[in-house]
Amino acid sequence: MLTDSFKEIIMLTKIPPEQIVIRPPVEAYSVLIPVTGGCSWNKCKFCGTYKGIYGVTQDYAIRPLENVKKDIDKYAENNYHGFPVFLAGGNPTSAPTDYLAEIIKYLRVKLRNVQRVSCYAKSLDILRKPDKDLKILAEAGLDIVYMGLESGSNKILRIMKKGTNAESMIKAGKKILNAGIKLSLYIILGLGSYEYSEEHVKETARVLTEINPTIFRFRTLNIMPGTPLWDEWKSGEFKLLSPVENLKEERDIIANLGENVTSQVFNDHISNYCAIESSNIKEDREMFIKTLDSYINDPRIQNLPRKNLTRM
């Protein structure tokens, strides 16, 4: 567990919203423009991104529009044309629609040949916006949002204090896609531990089948110091799955998908124990399952120790 002195240091290290804490791995070579700081929810049991796991805390805030435009101007002056653009912050879609649309239009004028405009989103933010607002963002040039499904199990979502449920995720996901915005969902393998592993698999596959997102991405649960889940793990209340058990969950989620699911699938994160991917899981499902089975039956992977990452 964290010592009291370390906790005190973390609490004292607060950064302003213009400093970016995280971005998706796929946005590693993108122009990063901070729009919001922190996360408007910030209560998930497994997440400490804005609560000290990187040695900093950051309160939720929406940056002044003129400051965001100044950042875009600087990138334009320094010839950052032709790159993807990631609008940074835990959930920029919490900001007013007109504000976001103006930022997106402005950067698409100032930065030539922008490949993609993306941001994180929360389901509650999406549900609060009328359909016409999401279409305004799509028409302005928002291409894709990254949203944490984590699990399709209402029980797991409630335990992990996600602040949403499966039906809300389904409704939000469909709203995004119907507006013409691509949707990338994150799934956390092992989030239900042993007790809810079967439910995690079946309900996650059900929700993915209902939404049929553009993309879904697997992440393997690693518990970060300073999160509420860390204390539960250290006390033995929460148990982490082994590498091969996480791979079994992934295999079973894929196997339980409906025939309508045509999503791209990625294992593009340092936490994962495989790197296989698909451009269309409907076409590649048999190959995907066979590959995962080969890993699951490999004695080297069966005896592989957990990574136990404490930073991502």
Image: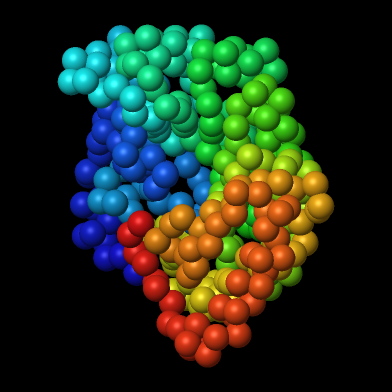
Q: Is 241 left or right of 130, judged from the image as shown?
A: left
Q: Is residue 120 above or below residue 180?
A: below
240 or 202, nearer to the observer:
202
- Where is residue 95? Give x, y as percent: 49, 20
Q: Is residue 92 above or below residue 256?
A: above
- Place residue 187 in its image quadrant: bottom right
Q: Is residue 250 above or below residue 113?
A: below
Residue positioned 53% across, 38% down in the render: 146
Residue positioned 54% across, 31% down in the render: 144
Residue positioned 51% across, 9% down in the render: 98
159 or 153, nearer to the observer:
153
Q: Is 120 left or right of 173, judged from the image as shown?
A: left
Residue positioned 32% across, 16% down in the render: 111
Answer yes or no: is residue 192 visible: no
- Where is residue 172? Give x, y as percent: 68, 33
Q: How many marks?
A: 0
- Place residue 60 in its image quadrant: top left
- Where is residue 287? Give x, y as percent: 66, 66
281 or 197, nearer to the observer:
281
